Image (tube, helix red, strand yellow):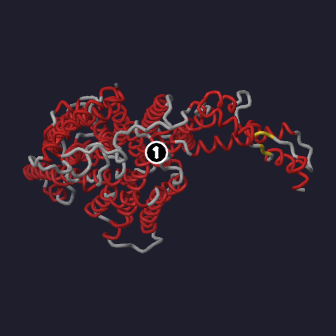
Amino acid sequence: MYHHYQQHRPRFPLFVFLYPFCNIKNSKVPFLIKRRSESSLLCKTLLSNCSISLHHFIYQETTKNQQIPRDSFFVVLVVMGKLHERFAGFINNRWLVFVAAMWIQSCAGIGYLFGSISPVIKSSLNYNQRQLASLGVAKDLGDSVGFLAGSLSEILPLWGALLVGAVQNLVGYGWVWLVVTGRAPVLPLWAMCILIFIGNNGETYFNTAALVSCVQNFPKSRGPVVGILKGFAGLSGAILTQIYATIHSPDHASLIFMVAVGPAMVVIALMFIVRPVGGHRQVRPSDGTSFTFVYSVCLLLAAYLMGVMLLEDLVDLSHTVVIIFTVVLFVLLLIPIVIPVSLSFFLDPRDPVEEPLLPETPKQEPGKSGQETPEVIFSEVEDEKPKEVDLLPASERQKRIAQLQAKLFQAAAEGAVRVKRRRGPHRGEDFTLMQALIKADFWLIFFSLLLGSGSGLTVIDNLGQMSQSLGYDNTHIFVSMISIWNFLGRVGGGYFSEIIVRDYAYPRPVAMAIAQLVMAVGHVFFAFGWPGALHIGTLLIGLGYGAHWAIVPAAASELFGLKKFGALYNFLTLANPAGSLVFSGLIASSIYDREAEKQAHGNNYLDRNSGSIFSGMLGLNEPLKCEGSICYFLTSLIMSAFCVVAFVLSTILVYRTKIVYTNLYGKSRS
């Protein structure tokens, strides 16, 4: 058959075979020859001399026993080829990775649900408040100790790190559920702390994989990307609570089961999608519109959850209405998938004809080291060059530095000076964690974050007790409100910090300094307890605290690079529990107990004078409670003062990194 086919086969030039897989209306192969004049002679020679019969052979072998028109067969091939091309583009679209990371982050903040599951653990295992507080400390440590997650993200593929986090989440909280429901033997307190630590530590893998992949895919939009992802992590508690309200059962331990199984299922389903896909090559003019669309969805989601929480608190809703609310919530979460679908299936991909024959030299992105063409700068050059050299354009700056180096070489040859190479990377290049730990800029970020976010986390952890001391009964309303403001602070912090660096080429820590001033004012409102002060303070603290976690990761990636970003980010997260330990564990609790003891002694004195002996005896067995704004007056003023100190540290960081941001973003702005 082969010899018969060779004798009678029609000969088709190469462009005839390629023609059905191109745009039929506009033949791109002849256009290719016209546009690329440098290679037109070579292309014409190849097209005229290379005859191919594979296209005809496929048609003959496929349709020899069937009556299929040739044109229909070719159309099917065209459609299949187009669909395969579009689907491959969809799988490798950086916006699909971003949307999948948003979904993972939507269930990555399981630590925010500890306040909802702790009463079940306390009643089932007969724990007292101190034992329950130990579990809370283990939860905070698990949420913040991410050294292993950062290290594994550099060794394993990101899907491997996500799988490890999903297994930790499932094993940790799954075992807790077995113990609470009596399906497993009761464990000692230290073992329960380890299980809570393991379960909550899975969050660090989710956060690391999502941030590392998306920051690499969107190197020019780090602020919005980090803000949106961290915002969804902060909102995950409200999302999971609403889902639990739909499947609510008399057994409250089922919430622990949902915390164990739900995030693990979502992460395993999406773990092969979240990865770097060369996003720097997918930059489109429509990216700004896409981010605006995502911001709109975020604002709509926050407003919707706020309204649903208020309705469920004020009105007794039926189970059917709750199900409808949850379905609408899922629809809002799915809406962002419209972006990668439209980019991949409804918009024409970038025409390869319009690309140059030789690829352009890629520009260095902020946070990436230029190790391929390093600029060798000696330490003496840094000492001798005038400060205004760094403010010059790149070409002029290199000329001035080259002149200084030439003079140093001449002086070194004459023995007048010893020239030595500067060790370690410069700001904006790739740092390892050990290299970053010896830099003053890194510790300025760390301590500024410790004072700012630590005071905010103290308010979040004690907000229920603070509202009770001021006479509010519905304390969970303020807890829900601050989670919404936290979400909006993260989204808004990423958005406005990006405007600062893109439009003005000013350091991103400026936004963090502004957030710390806002928090200082919020603590003052908490201190004086004026009418409505709790609402205003909750708003200011929530926005300022959330902004920290959108600004700091983006700033760290710009100053210390993307190569070891996972390890750097997870070290900076240690500032959160450290600040909470200082402000909440040492300052707030001590002052609260002292004020509560004063009020208890005063009440006992009044009871003795009035002859109420039995009430005084009964009051000894009740836990100490403090009432009035005096309970957190001194604590709030102290935290406000420390926020001012954090503002000073951030201002110093702005001054030190101003030249760096001018070099990173000033060129693109000009």
Q: Is residue 395 visible?
A: yes
Q: Residue 269 at what x, y percent from top left? A: 55, 54
Q: Residue 387 at what x, y percent from top left? A: 16, 33
Instruction: Count numbered badges in the picture.
Output: 1
View extreme (front): residue: 414
Q: Residue 58 at what x, y percent from top left? A: 82, 48
View extreme (bottom): residue: 185
Camera-side residue of 508 and 483? 508
Q: Residue 530 at what x, y percent from top left? A: 20, 32
Kindly indicate the quadrant of the structure image that contains residue 50: top right
Which type of secondary structure does the marked residue at label 1 adopt? helix
Q: Amino acid at mark 1?
A: Ile
- 250 displayed left or right of 4: left
Camera-side residue of 311 and 35? 35
**Residue at image location 22% in from the left, 53% down from the top:** 437
- 382 displayed left or right of 307: left
Q: Is residue 473 visible?
A: no
The vertical placement of 637 against 579, above or below, is: above
Quarter of the image that includes the C terminus: top left
**Residue that label 1 marks:** 239
Quarter of the image that includes the N terminus: bottom right
- 560 displayed left or right of 352: left
Badge 1: residue crowd in 10 Å (few <14, some 14–19, many ≥20): many
Camera-side residue of 612 and 80? 80
- 249 displayed left or right of 497: right
